[in-house]
Image: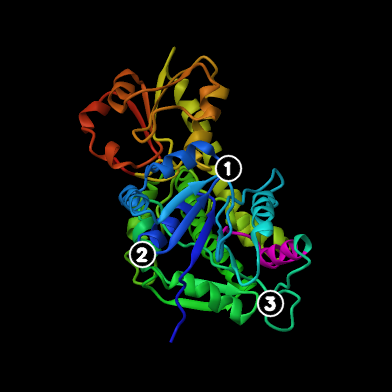
């Protein structure tokens, strides 16, 4: 019979993955302590509130807090298991920055007594989970760890990457298959016992490095396919063709499914993870690097096209619709829309730019620095605009009456209004 976890668990990082994971476990009876360095986040969670938008998460968090199963703190407690769910950004040279994982490891080390399981959920290059084990061993030489122990280690270390879609996290966290990679097979089994609490999909056991690579491959695969669509949009524009029509026709082939192009690729996964593969094997990952270059270049192209359209007017007003990295979420991480608006503002310092983003109430710092950029409702922005640029295909924009666009120059990067 498969082992199922029954103990106290601490989750370090209460962001888009850590908090839903905490709620999923706590609502199924596990005592969960959420840990975060952001005091505002800790206060919100402790009050049963969610600091970002995600369907069904608010009810789960408030219910878990009300039952006394979920608490939040800035201090890492003793626990039977620890999950690290902190950011893994890349640096200016696209090399991974592991400082947050290292900091989380340093918080966990003093709390270990032996018998605990430490799981890295943060997306990371192959070998990072073993580095966590080595770091812990350096900090706690009185304990044994699986990277060097020939017998049963005092502490088990594993990697279990998330594979969920913002806007559907609470559904997919439960229904999707889950890959669990341990430094040893027993490490994998100990980690799997935690995910069996709430995962209804298959739990697939492997080694830690393969699990780390699998998550990167999943997002690199999607990035390459998006890059193909984005490159087609550039080619079609050059040939004066409608890329949406070209893709519609091509997709009638029974073995072809070209994705839709857009203004770039955002989010903390697809826009970031492929670089971890490039960093691990730079000479062998030419296609993945090229896909990243294509997708990273698309926001610059869109900004240049908008600036060119401004030349038709004496003192134009531009409405940019959407700042999130994808439709119907408030997640602005790595959003190409923000880069596009910033690039337009920098190219045309005096340009009147109205931004509409129904899921946020303040401009991100990158745009707030530009005095000519203001945030306002979509209807007001469109009414004042000479040029309307659709950057995110929110349902809110889809429902707008087309009559509002009459007489405007419209640049639809999502094909929403074709």
Find out whether the residues at labels 1 and 2 contact each other: C-beta distance under 8 Å. Answer: no
x 30%, y 21%: residue: 380
Position of 182 compared to 61: left or right? right
x 46%, y 62%: residue: 163
Mark 2 secondary-structure assignment: loop
Residue 265: in sight, yes or no?
Answer: no
In whole angstroms, how far apart are the C-alphas of marks 1 and 2?
26 Å
Residue 335: in sight, yes or no?
Answer: yes
Please give the count of numbered marks on the rendered protein. Answer: 3
Mark 1 secondary-structure assignment: loop
**Residue topped by disc 1:** 37
Residue 365 sits in quarter: top right
Residue 78, above or below 194: above
**Image quadrant where one finds the N terminus:** bottom left
**Residue topped by disc 3:** 153
- Residue 302 colored in magenta in the image: no
Residue 54 or residue 31, whichever sits in front: 31
- Decide: few, some or many residues near mark 1? Use Cα within 10 Å; few <14, some 14-19, many ≥20: few
Numbered mark located on residue 237 in the image: none
Q: Give residue 138's position: percent from left, percent from top.
A: 78, 62
Q: Give residue 168's position: percent from left, percent from top.
A: 35, 55
Residue 84 sits in quarter: bottom right
**Residue topped by disc 2:** 28
Position of 386 compared to 225: left or right? left
Q: Give the range drawn in magenta.
A: 121-137
Find out whether the residues at labels 3 and 1 contact each other: C-beta distance under 8 Å. Answer: no
Q: Give residue 166's position: percent from left, percent from top.
A: 40, 52
Residue 406 or residue 32, whichever sits in front: 32
- Decide: few, some or many residues near mark 3? Use Cα within 10 Å; few <14, some 14-19, many ≥20: many
């Amino acid at each position: 019979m498969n082992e199922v976890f029954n103990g106290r668990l601490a989750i370090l990082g209460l962001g888009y993955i850590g908090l839903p994971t905490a709620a999923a476990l706590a609502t199924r009876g596990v005592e969960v302590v959420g840990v975060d360095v952001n005091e505002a986040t800790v206060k919100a969670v402790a009050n049963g509130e969610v600091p970002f938008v995600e369907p069904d998460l608010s009810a789960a968090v408030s219910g878990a807090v009300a039952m006394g199963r979920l608490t939040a703190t800035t201090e890492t407690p003793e626990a039977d298991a620890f999950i690290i769910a902190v950011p893994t950004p890349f640096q200016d040279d696209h090399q991974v920055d592991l400082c947050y994982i290292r900091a989380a490891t340093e918080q966990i080390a003093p709390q270990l007594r032996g018998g605990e399981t430490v799981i890295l959920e943060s997306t990371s290059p192959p070998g990072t989970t073993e580095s966590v084990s080595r770091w812990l061993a350096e900090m706690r030489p009185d304990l044994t760890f699986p990277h060097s122990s020939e017998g049963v280690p005092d502490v088990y270390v594993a990697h279990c990457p998330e594979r969920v879609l913002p806007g559907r996290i609470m559904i997919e966290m439960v229904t999707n298959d889950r890959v669990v990679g341990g430094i040893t097979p027993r490490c994998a089994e100990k980690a799997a016992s935690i995910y069996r609490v709430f995962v209804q999909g298959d739990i697939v056991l492997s080694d830690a490095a393969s699990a780390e690579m699998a998550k990167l491959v999943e997002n690199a695969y999607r990035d390459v396919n998006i890059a193909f669509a984005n490159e087609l949009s550039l080619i079609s524009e050059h040939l004066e063709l409608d890329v949406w029509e070209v893709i519609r026709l091509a997709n009638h082939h029974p073995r072809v499914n070209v994705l839709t192009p857009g203004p770039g690729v955002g989010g903390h996964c697809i826009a970031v993870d492929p670089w971890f593969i490039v960093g691990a094997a730079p000479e062998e990952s030419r296609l993945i690097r090229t896909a990243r270059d294509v997708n990273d270049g698309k926001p610059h192209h869109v900004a240049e096209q908008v600036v060119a359209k401004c030349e038709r007017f004496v003192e134009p007003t531009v409405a940019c619709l959407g700042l999130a990295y994808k439709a119907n979420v408030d997640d602005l991480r790595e959003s190409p829309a923000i880069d596009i608006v910033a690039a337009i503002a920098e190219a045309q310092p005096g340009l009147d730019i109205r931004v509409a983003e129904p899921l946020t109430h303040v401009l991100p710092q990158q745009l707030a620095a530009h005095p000519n950029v203001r945030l306002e409702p979509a209807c007001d922005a469109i009414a004042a605009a000479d040029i309307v640029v659709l950057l995110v295909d929110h349902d809110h924009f889809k429902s707008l009456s087309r009559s509002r666009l009459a007489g405007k120059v419209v640049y639809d990067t999502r094909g929403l209004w074709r």
